[in-house]
Amino acid sequence: MNLPATRHSILEAVRSDDAEVRRDGYGAMVAVYWKPVYKYVRLRWRIAADEAQDTTQEFFARAIEKSFFESYDASKARFRTFLRLCLDRFIANERKASARMKRGGGQIVVPLDFQSAEGELLQHDVALPPDLDEYFHREWIRSLCALAVDDLRREYEAAGKRRQFRVFERYDLEAPAGGIALTYTDVAAECDVSPADVTNYLFAARRAFRRALLERLRSVCGTSREFEAEARQLLRGGLR
Amino acid sequence: MTWLSDAAVERLRDVADFPVPPARYEMLEPLARGGMGTVYRARDRELDRVVAMKVLSATSAREDLPLRMQQEARILAALEHPGIVPVYDVGTLDDGRIFYVMKLVQGPRLDEHAADRPLAERLRLFTRICEPVAFAHARGVVHRDLKPANVMIGAFGEVLVLDWGVAQTISDCGAATMDARPTVAGTAGYMPPEQARGDAVDARADVFALGGILHFLLTGAPPDAAPLQGPRAVQAICRKARADAPADRYADVPSLVGDVDRFLAGDSVSALDEGALDRIARVVRRNRVAIAIVVTYLMLRYLIAWLAP
């Protein structure tokens, strides 16, 4: 069928015997989850920005060192639920012990752009969201979409299709000025292409985005069933 | 990583799933979403008519699903019955998703239909729901997802059984030929135990679901959400249809309908072993007009005799 099968499953990668594959797997996992984790730590646990950054880094570093994620059982829960429970347990244990382990030499430090995450957080009301499950899910979707957009951008730039990507970016990603929706004619004029080109570029870019998004999603799901269930929630045919 | 606003995320989620149909069709707007896919309003440019296009979800890991879905669509296209929505076309989108094009039908679903109708009217409605199901069974097709939300009541009272997306053909030995996937097919409360287990199913799986619909018509609530109500005979019919073991259910839909018809005619039903009181009560109910006339006559005679000098 039309299923993306190219991206290696992160969950398989982190269980690999090959250290390089394992490291890449953890890198990919951190890329998807670090922002939801950071924002969740800030809001759910009311931890200040500096400490939340440490906590986020420590959580992933400890998860990698102690192989938290290798014990994941796909028959019991979705991976994102499992990860969030690991995170809650990690923070609760840290607090109980009142002896936070400081990162030291030899530990894995993941470079994360916390400034951008903090900036995103400030765009919203920092009050505690009523449903933290829903909040974590929403932030996880935001991460997946953002990574898929980055994948698409790289793919288009490699193929010399900057203008095509710009049309997609302008029409589908950027908020319309003054809340007035852009027309294809507006975008055509801005990007110096014809309205028919806009139609064609959007058609192709949306298909490519869909593929990239499903690839990203598949890579973070433990089983086909989990992937199907997550995708049904993620893609909803324009229905609210 | 690119920063995406809430609006951009929502838009991306929409555009990632919105189908691009073949040139013959113009997509209009989404109408409903089910477990298997999304139904859109679409325009057939060649015949200049508005149709319903069901686009199946693109997320199944089953590689053979497209072929099976096409086979099912062909089976459904052969089911020409006024109670079954006709399939006009089936095909594959550029991105590999399967779609059906169907007649666009509109009206309330059974679960939105007014429940405060007389019992006899609800039971007659039930037998009309059974008709297309029995028709499909006679042609070797089991619906497997019958429930009030999949029954539409048309503007002129016509009954349509919808959503045959998980229907299966029945082999000569009586069991469904395509493997059942409980995660995809069926709805809790209406799904028989054998289907929930992923075992092969036959027409009696639909009998079980029809029992659930009868429960809904009697109580206004799904099975397991409210105790059965109504005359004992109808409750017995419902319980027999919903028996856990297929062998304890009605063997087929006509047998179930036969019992409902017998109840409506005031006869005994096979699902209830009547005692003497039940039989007397039923005979009284059945002949209540004649009995009322005789009683009135006797009372008048007695009154006249009493008043006479």
Image: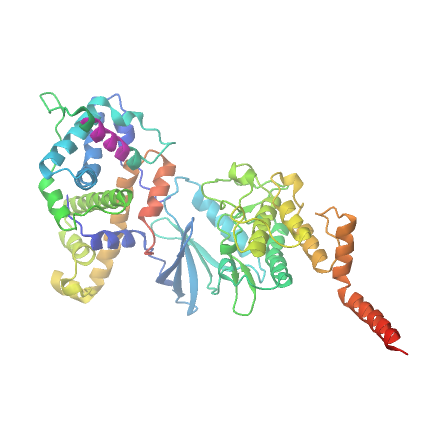
B112 relative position to A146: left or right: right
A90 drawn magenta: yes
The rendered magenta stretch, by its main secondary structure, is classed as: helix
What residue is at 56 percent from the left and 38 percent from the top?
A: B194
- Of residues A30 and B240, the one nearer the viewer is B240
Q: Which residues are magenta?
A: A83-94
Asked whether residue A27 appears in the rendered view, the answer is yes
Q: Residue furthest bottom?
A: B309
Q: Is residue B279 above or below residue A97?
A: below
In the rendered image, which quarter contains the N terminus of chain B? top left
Find residue B80 and report its image quarter: bottom right
Residue A69 horizontal/vertical position (percent)? 27, 28
Residue B135 horizontal/vertical position (percent)? 62, 55
What residue is at 22 percent from the left and 63 percent from the top?
A: A196
A218 relative position to A105: left or right: right
- Of residues B17 and B293, the one nearer the viewer is B293
In the rendered image, which quarter contains the C terminus of chain B? bottom right
What residue is at 20 percent from the left and 61 percent from the top?
A: A197
- Of residues B29 and B242, the one nearer the viewer is B242
- Of residues A108 and A14, the one nearer the viewer is A108
Residue A113 horizontal/vertical position (percent)? 10, 39
B243 drawn magenta: no
Total marks in image: 0
Q: Is residue A53 above or below residue B279?
A: above
Residue B109 horizontal/vertical position (percent)? 49, 60
Q: Residue furthest right?
A: B309
